[in-house]
Amino acid sequence: MSTGALRKVVGAAVLVCLLVVAVLLGPPYVTNLNYSSALRDIVADPAAASWPDSRFQTEAASAAARFGLPVAPSAVRVLRSGGGLRLEVRYQIPVELTVYTVRLHLRATSGS
């Protein structure tokens, strides 16, 4: 096999490996986007302005459970500033690859 052909085969193998990793790591990121959307819906509730922080933490943890995410109420930060409200949740998801386990550290927020 010539050097040029070998390079093409190795290059194709590397691209296939990268594609497999992307397919395995993609779903947690999509779930994170959907969870962020659920957090925005919680904050957008007109009655939410009068809620205590503990209610936001409970609602955010319940939304995480619907997506199968391992989020405890204590992992939810409620940030209030200038009449605005923001939720921030940091959590980890292990993703099993064939030879390695990747622990993704994700953050979902209710906005900027």
Image (cartoon, helix red, strand yellow):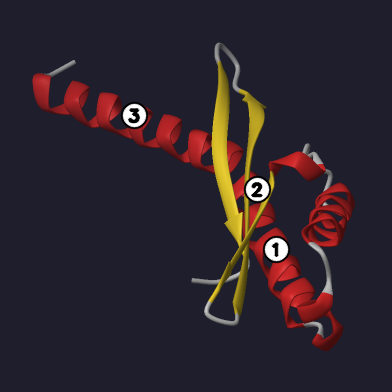
Q: Do the residues labelled 1 and 2 touch (CB within 8 Å)?
A: no
Q: Which mark's residue is nearer the viewer, 1 or 2?
A: 1
Q: Position of residue 35 (x, y in %)?
A: 71, 59
Residue 69, can we see it? no
- Residue at disc 3, secondary structure: helix
Question: Horizontal placement of 67 versus 79: left or right?
Answer: right
Residue 32, can we see it? yes
Question: Horizontal placement of 7 versus 106: left or right?
Answer: left
Q: Which of 23 and 81 is in front in this view?
A: 81
Question: Horizontal placement of 22 versus 94: left or right?
Answer: left
65, above or below 91, in the image: below
Q: Position of residue 11 (x, y in %)?
A: 26, 31
The answer to which of marks 1 and 3 sits earlier in the sequence is 3
Residue that numbered label 3 is attached to = 14
Separation (CA) of disc 1 from disc 3? 31 Å
50, above or below 86, in the image: below
Q: Where is residue 28 in the image (x, y as percent from the top left)?
A: 64, 45
The kind of residue tagged 2 is Pro
Name the residue rendered at 80%, 39% in the picture.
Answer: 72
Name the residue rendered at 60%, 37% in the picture.
Answer: 24
Separation (CA) of disc 1 from disc 2? 11 Å
Residue that numbered label 2 is attached to = 27
The answer to which of marks 3 and 2 sits earlier in the sequence is 3
